[in-house]
Image (cartoon, rainbow, N blue to C red):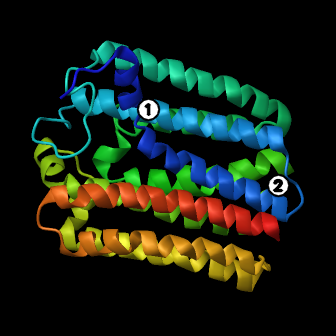
Amino acid sequence: MTELSRGGAWLLASRPKTLSAAVAPVLTGAGLAAFHQTLAWLPAVAALLGAVLIQIGTNFANDYYDFVRGGDTEARVGPVRVTQAGILPPASVKRAMWAVLGAAMLVGVYLVWVAGWPIVWIGLASVACAVLYTGGPFPLAYHGLGDLFVFLFFGLIAVGGTYYVQALAWPPDAVLAGAGVGALNTAILVVNNLRDIETDRVAGKRTLAVRLGVTGTRVEYHALVVAAAAVPVVGVLRFGWPEAALAALLFLPLVRTPLRAVRTFHDPRELLPALGSTARAVVVYGALLGLGLALG
């Protein structure tokens, strides 16, 4: 591996390709606020910054805690983890985790000022779960709860919270939109865990993929894609969303290849492109759903 600069090492640790998981729900929440004529730019931008910081903090936490728990070994297939690879010291990654999450909480102070006490509880829960996902006495990812965590915090709460800081309300269609983005964000995790199913099993990391097995995880991925595709259709029919929201369905061509890979893979390495393609699909979905709603 080419020797990295210190800045390059931290960029690698932040996992830029995963930031789509944080950006997509905010784009959708902002578009929904525009549809309801409650768009407020400054709270929306602050929500985006806070979401990205929490995602980076979560990535640092995963890098550190998976290493110290033995979840990341040389047998693991996938992108480089800076702690396991010896690129950055574990103590430095842990300090960076707290620094980034602290910055997210500072952004949260402004959002609390704008939107009140509900944001306190959302912010504290988000930061706590960022650490508890792989850290603490009961790490969520190690007990099969990672999928639920992602669906809630990178779907329902991220979209609904973005809408709330602008409108001080949480309408039913914000829940629907959050379910769509949450389903696709969870699909990213599903591909990741399907790829790591054997090494996670050996390490004692009982992800939902380990519990469901390969066949069950394949079914889960397909179900999440179908759920995401159904959301804009239901929104148009049930909540009067503009037909432009159906543009979100343009994410489907992007997941055609990942769907095939998930269905037919034999070597975990075959899932590496599927991970990136699913992440790109999330951005396209969130951006087009938000734009389609805003145009309404």
Q: Is residue 191 left or right of residue 16?
A: left
Q: The residue tagged with tag 2: helix, strand or loop? A: loop
Q: Residue at x 88, y 55 (%)?
A: 38
- Callout 2 crowding tier (Cα within 10 Å): few <14, some 14–19, many ≥20: some
Give the quarter of the figure containing the C terminus: bottom right
Question: 13 and 97: which one is in front?
Answer: 13
Q: Is residue 254 left or right of residue 262?
A: right
Q: The residue tagged with tag 1: helix, strand or loop? A: helix
Q: Is residue 238 visible?
A: yes
The residue that disc 1 covers is 131
Give the quarter of the figure containing the N terminus: top left
| Distance in Å between CA atoms under marks 1 and 2 | 28 Å
- Three-letter code for the amino acid on which mark 2 is drawn: Ala
Q: Residue at x 60, y 75 (%)?
A: 231
The residue that disc 2 covers is 169
- Three-letter code for the amino acid on which mark 1 is drawn: Val
In this view, 214 is above or below 167: below
Percent x, y for residue 212? 24, 66
Residue 155 is labelled as: none
In this view, 58 is above or below 186: above
